[in-house]
Amino acid sequence: MAEETPLLNKRPTSSESQINNSKLYLAVFSAILGNFNFGYSLVYSSPVLPQLMRPDAEPRLRMDTEQAAWFGSIYTLGAAAGGLGAMLLNDLIGRKLSIMMSAVPSTIGYMMLGGAVDRWMLHVGRFLTGIAGGMTAASIPVYISEISHKSVRGALGSCPQITAVFGALALYALGLVLPWRWLAVAGEVPALLMVVLLVFMPCSPRRLLSLGREQQAERALRWLRGKNYDIHIELSAIQHSINTQGKVTWSQLATPLYYRPIMISVVMRFLQQMTGITPILVYLETIFSQSKAFLEPRYDAAIVGAVRLLSVATAAMLMDKAGRKALLYTSSMLMFVSSLTLTMISHTTSCPLGPTTENVTASLDYNSHDDLGITAASILPLISTMVFIFGYAMGWGPITWLLMSEVLPLAARGVASGLCVTVSWLTAFMLTHAFTHLVDKYGLYVPYLGFTVVCVLCLLFNAVCIPETRGRSLEEIENYFRTGRTFTITRSHSTAHSRA
């Protein structure tokens, strides 16, 4: 058996040339519409909060600093709840149905936001869209990794992040022309379209095999790969992985096969949020309004959204060429340099930068006295923020989601992915809620300084803990954690079979 297995690893070379990925791309597109909605709803507060905090806002909807902090951060609390829900639903009803079910809280939430007549409706609506975001964040990367061939898994694995970024950019663009209630109405469209398309898409072949539905798994994989692709080698590899896993016990969680990939995924999601990406995106227009930007904050936000989309697209093209670790190194360095620059810029500006009349007056006086100085000072925050977003979206944005779906063991993937998303969004909630109060008390200097320190930790964690998974099958990655840090992944199947 050990002599036959290497041939199984090499035979797909001839059949791979006959793969037809067109239907795979359609299935991925159908799923990532949920990420479009996720990106859209995450930054919904950016153009909405400035309108709700104005003196001329509707009295029953007008928000002060504390209420604005809750409106911005309660989304992440909902996302944490959605992650917990997905932790159960992923294994109970499957990845595809979990993604489809996210449309229910999303649609109800947007209806409440669009028709809000009191502040509690705004908060509940934002919480419900957060639940939908947490469900899709936990389910879509796993679904994509399980239906994708390893030759395109890296590029397709970055698609959820690309679509989320595109959703955010769509929100920023629509925010230039639509009032905030119509922004909520527009947010219902992608979720409903996602449900319609996913009805016709196959379930994950891995999940079907784990349920003993061999014929359905074979039909699903043949639909995804095309009729001229030899699916039996891939099916046997998936089946072998399932057979060697079984049910996870508490004692098994103490073995390297389980605790190493789970810890790597959890810590990566924690560090990803601690870089400050969520509060920066949620309060982007408010941040620009306090940074003396040379354009209106809403235009600055749209520019940053376009840069974010460009950087994620770049990462998708490089994912299977440069490798995961190289992009993470580049991402960490770009975020460190830009956040350090923002720290120094904010340290030289006046102290608390809260949205007070005195600060607005000071900004106007400053603009009228030294045009050249203000032009340089107003460009630097925009450029630094663009570099920060570019760096994040090149590495720690998409690769964190991709690695989570790649390294988590199959037997614990549904539960572990929900745990990762829950940890991620609880961290985001605490950081996003605290951000507004920190800025009001200390200015932008203190939050930016903390983000700079976290970027250094990201660099070190990538160097010490994260394996390179480029070009590796999910079974090879599992064997890497099973056999220890020798990184003899290329012989994983022969080793596993010979021991069997």
Image: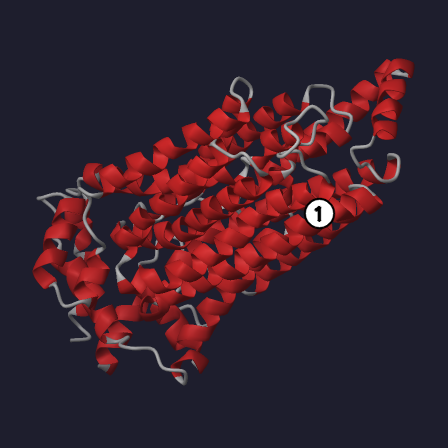
As helix, strand or loop, the secondary structure at mark 1 comes to helix
Residue 184 in percent (x, y) is at: 47, 31
Q: Nearer the viewer, residue 473 or 174?
A: 174
Residue 117 in percent (x, y) is at: 54, 34
Location of the C terminus by quadrant is bottom left
Residue 237 picture quarter: bottom left
Callout 1 amino acid = Phe
Residue 361 in percent (x, y) is at: 87, 23
Q: Is residue 18 visible?
A: yes
> Callout 1 environment at 10 Å: few (<14), some (14 to 19), or many (20+)?
many
In the picture, measured across the screen, residue 388 lies left or right of residue 40, that is right
Residue 345 picture quarter: top right
Q: Residue furthest bottom?
A: 251
Location of the N terminus by quadrant is bottom left
Residue 221 in percent (x, y) is at: 16, 52
Residue 498 picture quarter: bottom left
Q: Nearer the viewer, residue 269 or 282?
A: 282
Residue pointed to by mark 1:
435
Instruction: Report the residue at 73% width, 41% height from top.
Output: 65
Instruction: Report the residue at 20% width, 43% height from top.
Output: 199
Q: Is residue 466 visible?
A: no
Instruction: Report the residue at 45% width, 67% height from top.
Output: 261
In the picture, measured across the screen, residue 92 lies left or right of residue 141, that is left
Instruction: Report the residue at 13% width, 45% height from top.
Output: 223
Image vertical order of residue 304 relative to residue 442, above or below: above
